């Protein structure tokens, strides 16, 4: 095991998990900041990215950062990044409506599309910082440790989820937690993000680029989030929210995990095919 990689990973994880609490500490001295857009939240968002950047610069290590888009040959993975969240959302909301657990509010399509486009644009910027931290640094460095896939998913998923701890416990206002406590939301988020991580890790490994993950994360912020949470275009009952919420619901989580495992199977099959081709070329 490469001791330098392990050392840098530990540094990255410690600073990442501390970043939000440093932000909370800074915010405690500042008043009259816009809710959801404080200096502490900004620090929480960018500090993991800056840490990863400094570690790569100090080690002159850029080989697996995933910054190249590799459009050629990756069209299907970019297409996948665009359709996964809308597909799962349509399935979940369709099932919720069929069973009477969802109600659609009256709205004009251009209103929804305007909000979705605005959220996508903002999400693209935000998720550059997130995805180049989690998939651009954390994931490839864990993979370099030569541990099995399941530990890659669990470690990277937990770090990603636990990074959100101050967000859920402090930064978010109380109206987000009317049906669940903050601690309960954090615990469920840990399970959900580990399931999501399989999908993000495998998309990165297939494309060898972080950009499909940036795009997919932005679509998540724009489509299901705006439709059900921030925009309020669709209302779910309490039971409907547990089962059919397209972001946190049980059905959605199972679908995301299944998609991730499918991507893993495709990657393994592709790797075997490439290895066999190399062996045949040497004969």
Image (cartoon, rainbow, N blue to C red):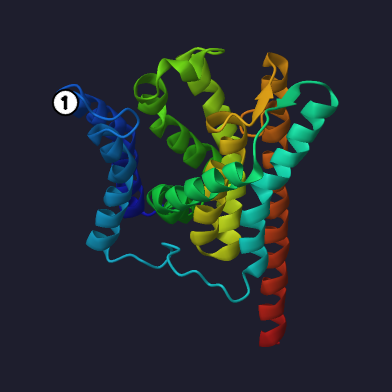
Quarter residue 223 falls in: top right
Please name the residue shown 40% across and 68% down the image. Answer: 63
Q: How many labels does the image show?
A: 1
In the image, farthest residue toward the left: 29
Q: Which of 113 and 131 is in front in this view?
A: 113
Badge 1: residue crowd in 10 Å (few <14, some 14–19, many ≥20): few
Q: Is residue 49 shown to the viewer in this render?
A: yes
Asked whether residue 258 appears in the rendered view, the answer is no
Q: Is mark 1 on a helix, strand or loop?
A: loop
Q: Position of residue 5 (x, y in %)?
A: 35, 53
Give the percent coordinates (x, y) of residue 110: 61, 47
Q: Which residue is drawn at 68% across and 65% down?
A: 76
Residue that mark 1 sits on: 30
Compared to 78, does 37 lie above or below? above
Which percent across, then down, holds residue 24?
Answer: 25, 26
Against 93, is 283 above or below?
below
Is 118 on the left or on the right of 188, as rendered? left
* Residue beneath the point at 25% across and 62% down: 57
Q: In which quarter of the image is the C terminus?
A: bottom right
Describe residue 134's horizontal placement relative to residue 27 as left or right.
right
Tell me if residue 22 comes above or below residue 186 in the rendering: below
Camera-side residue of 108 and 279: 108
């Amino acid at each position: 095991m490469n001791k330098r990689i392990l050392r840098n990973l530990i540094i990255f994880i410690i600073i990442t998990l501390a970043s939000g609490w440093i932000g909370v500490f800074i915010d405690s001295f500042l008043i009259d900041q816009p809710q959801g857009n404080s200096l502490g939240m900004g620090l929480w968002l960018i500090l993991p990215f800056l840490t990863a950047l400094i570690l790569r610069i100090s080690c002159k290590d850029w080989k697996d950062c995933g910054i190249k888009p590799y459009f050629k040959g990756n069209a299907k993975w970019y297409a996948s990044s665009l359709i996964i969240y809308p597909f799962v959302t349509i399935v979940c909301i369709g099932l919720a409506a069929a069973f009477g657990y969802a109600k659609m509010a009256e709205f004009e399509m251009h209103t929804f599309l305007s909000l979705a486009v605005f959220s996508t644009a903002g999400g693209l910027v935000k998720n550059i910082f997130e995805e180049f931290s989690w998939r651009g640094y954390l994931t490839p460095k864990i993979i370099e440790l030569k541990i099995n896939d399941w530990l890659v998913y669990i470690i990277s998923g937990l770090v990603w989820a636990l990074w959100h701890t101050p967000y859920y416990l402090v930064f978010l206002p109380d109206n987000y937690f009317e049906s669940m406590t903050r601690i309960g939301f954090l615990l469920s988020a840990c399970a959900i993000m580990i399931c999501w991580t399989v999908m993000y890790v495998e998309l990165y490994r297939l494309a060898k680029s972080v950009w499909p993950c940036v795009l997919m994360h932005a679509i998540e912020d724009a489509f299901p989030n705006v439709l059900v949470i921030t925009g309020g275009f669709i209302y779910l009952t309490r039971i409907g929210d547990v089962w059919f919420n397209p972001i946190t619901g049980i059905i959605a989580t199972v679908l995301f995990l299944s998609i991730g495992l499918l991507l893993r199977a495709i990657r393994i099959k592709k790797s075997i095919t490439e290895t066999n081709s190399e062996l045949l070329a040497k004969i």
